[in-house]
Amino acid sequence: MKNSNVKTVKAIFVKIYKAIVVLSPFGLILSIAFFMIQAKESGKLVANLVHIEQSLSTRHIGIFPDYLDKINQLLSETPCAQEDSTRMIIFQDVLFYGAFYNGHAFKEMIRQLVELSDKGKKIVIAYYNNSEDMRTGRMFKEVVQESWIRQQDLGKLSQERRTLMSSLRKENQSRTNVFSIADSIVNEKYFAYYRDNEQKEFAKRVEKALVPFYDETKNDDLLFLKIDQIKNRYLNKFFHTITFQDIYKMYHQITEELKDFFEQKNIQLIPLNNYLTMSCWSNGEKALFAFPGKFAAEEIGFISSDLAILHYIDIMLEGVENINNDE
């Protein structure tokens, strides 16, 4: 009997409390005050979590091309005092890194690299060589394939290439011909399939690639005008006449323009023939680096001030410099 009375009293109290809180002005004030306290505490918690995340020596910063602007932020924070002996170290799969995904970020990257070089900062860019010899520059070729052929077809393309290479080897073709012929046949096949059967998607891709770097109102460097001229030469053709070889030649010629430009600006270039699985930008104090996902265009970016990572990038550069010296 006693327990029943207690339950009844509790139930009555809850109903009275709800009526006061929900219906009365006093209850409304209590509710608002409680909400404000909760919001304040939540704000403090979020601020604390953000502070912790930003204080980590290494943290995730997004997937390509989301982190391109953060590369420019790193460049803007790069020390370039005369007594500073550190180098700006860059490893990229292609010299036009990000140019066809965020033209503004690419232009800013070039501008900042030139400015740092003019101030006396030593800059070294190691990149995958895009030689016409298909035994080298394999990563460059993969970048072109992944950019212009549907990703769902890349597995079929790779299998068909392997089959062709096997048959060509049985015919005692040279190694160079094996790569060149197999690439040419399968790339053109799958590119043409994508171009002709996914016209809307393909047209968007062409249109995006033709967005100009050059802005006459800002008197941009002649480099960007040259890049636009190269793009227009190959992509402003009749729709069904654009070939995979056009795309490859376009990227190749843009790379050659960038090579000349960087050399004129005293930026050291180191062509690589071996595949490296990390792109990075290190200014001696911080490093932004990215690892490829399933596809090259899905790199996952991180930023770090960890001394071990900075040291590893230095060692990586020493390694490729030693290989080049031995050759």
Image (spheres, rainbow, N blue to C red):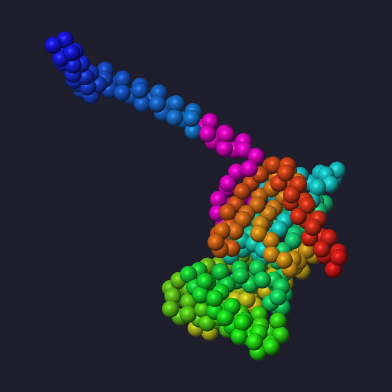
Q: Residue at x 72, y 63 (%)?
A: 127
The image position of residue 197, as x and y in percent, is 43, 78
Does residue 69 belong to the magenta stretch? yes
Q: From the viewer's perspective, is 69 left or right of 6? A: right
Give above or below for 223 relative to 108: below
The image position of residue 42, as x and y in percent, is 44, 30
Nearer to me, 242 or 176: 176
Look at the image and tell me in which quarter the N terminus lies: top left
Nearer to me, 157 or 12: 157
Counting every numbered tag in the picture gives 0
Q: From the viewer's perspective, is 109 left or right of 45? A: right
Q: From the viewer's perspective, is 219 left or right of 118? A: left
The image position of residue 310, as x and y in percent, is 73, 46
Q: Residue at x 66, y 50 (%)?
A: 288
Give above or below for 81 relative to 5: below
Residue range (magenta): 47-73
Question: Which residue extends farthest front?
Answer: 170
Q: Residue at x 56, y 63 (%)?
A: 295
The image position of residue 273, as x and y in percent, is 73, 68
Q: Quadrant of residue 272?
A: bottom right
Q: Residue at x 35, y 21 (%)?
A: 33
Asked if residue 292 can be seen in this view, the reply is: yes
Nearer to me, 154 or 83: 154
Q: Quadrant of residue 115?
A: bottom right
Question: Which residue extends farthest left?
Answer: 1
Asked if residue 118 can be seen in this view, the reply is: no
Does residue 277 belong to the magenta stretch? no
Question: Which residue extends farthest top?
Answer: 2
Give above or below for 212 relative to 21: below
Q: Quadrant of residue 159?
A: bottom right
